[in-house]
Image (cartoon, coloured by chain):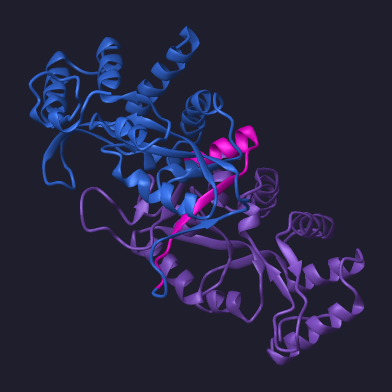
Amino acid sequence: MLDIKSKQKLVDLLYKSGAIIFTKNSPNNIPYEIRLQYLTSQPKILSFVAKLLWSTIKNETFDLIAGPYTDIPLATTISLEHNWPMIFIRGERKRYGMEKLIEGNYNIDQKVIVVDEEVSDPADTLQLLGRLEGSGLNIIGLFVLIDRGQGKLQKIRNNGFKCDALINLSDIFLRLFETGKISSEQLNRTREYFKRKLTRDLNLL
Amino acid sequence: MTIFDSKIKEKMILDLYEVHIIDFGHFKLKSGISSPYYIDLRLLVTFPHLLELVSDVLWEKIRLKPFDLIAGIPYAALPISTAISLRYNRPMIFLRKEVKSYGKGKTIEGIYHKGQHVVIIDDVISDGASKFETIKPIEDVGLEVSQVVVLLDRGQGGPRIVQKRGYQCVAITNMEEVLEVLYNHGRITYERLKECQKFIFKTSTNTNIKNDKTSLRYKKV
């Protein structure tokens, strides 16, 4: 798990880069937006996120880093900066030629760490993990940048996979409030939004 | 090409062969024909140091023309453009091939502004047609294509076709050069060299080849 200082630095960086913004909202709208594509466009930030992810996985024993085809940059960054081989998983198998479901070399029984920005659809994530296991690989765990709540990471864990995030929504909102980037009014609005969403795993002060 | 450039390129070709990214044998291509060689640059992800070397070789060409953004064509070029982005601290956009049911075609991910110049990167170029599938969405959002840089020219006239449509297009190397380097360094036999050269001749649409009827399609500029 990340220490407080690193979490704070990460949130500050994500906010500064424009990856997290607060929108003018009406009662029914989502009060914030997290645009992770802003992350992959900025090499220094991508590099920092990769460094933090590495600090959480480096104590695990593994052979390969794996990323979904939807987020090749993050896995590639970790791979390059720590000289670790990676594989990536395609969406669907092509019917012709030499195209495979998993790109990159791997051997059966190798241990794999999967990295992604977040779990947006647990079903998609589970399908991806299933594809890796179906190819004979051993999944050590899934490590993501952001836990956006709604029990998505728990769904992955319920299927027997270790699953951790660098930061969650309360890390983000508390830090933004601490640094004066959002007002207490915005903080309350956000809390109300989540109350309405009945998200029980968000614990705001 | 300086001596330094060609040495680096040679090293890259030898390394690519060493790890079987460049491979020889009998390979069935998607067109149905059998090829005596196969090159799979998606395997670069297994070899981070080699991925870096490839990105450095491409950078030598990329840096010659000003640009704001790098765009890699999915999927083989995505790790390559990420490597360039990280090593040379340049922002990157990438095209997402939509696979969800509500939308087909490519959308662009990343931060960009109208009028910015983009260098498009790909691993190989055949007849060039697929490059336009990337050029179009990029231009549609108001970006300009500065140049297209590719690692390997398959010898089907791709760079020329792209250039004819008004875009600068350059390939770092081609199969002739790859074979020459491998043969000169004793990695492949003379028989293998000839077999591959014959195949390239047979399947090439290069206008420099005499008596090739397909060359009549392209007029000399």
User: The N terminus of chain A appears in which quarter of the rendering?
Assistant: bottom right
Q: Is residue A18 left or right of residue B166?
A: right
Query: In the image, is residue A188 above or below residue A172?
Result: below
Image quarter of residue A29 = bottom right
What residue is drawn where x is 46% and y is 76%?
Answer: A123
Q: Colour of chain A?
A: purple
Asked if residue A95 shows in the view, the reply is yes
Residue B74 visible somewhere in the drawing: no
Which residue is pictured at 18% across the width and 44% down the height?
Answer: B29
Q: Residue at x 13, y 29 (%)?
A: B216
Q: Which residues are magenta?
A: B80-100
Side (left or right) of B35 relative to A77: left
Rendered location of residue B76, percent (x, y): 40, 44
The quadrant in which the C terminus of chain A is found is bottom right
Q: Is residue A23 magenta?
A: no
Horizontal side, residue B52 vs residue B154: left or right: right
Q: Is residue A146 left or right of residue B178?
A: right
Residue B114 on image: x %, y % = 60, 50
Vertical comparison of B201 with A177: above or below: above
Q: Report the chain shown in blue.
A: B
Q: Position of residue B72 (x, y in %)?
A: 47, 44
Above or below: residue B208 compared with residue A130 = above
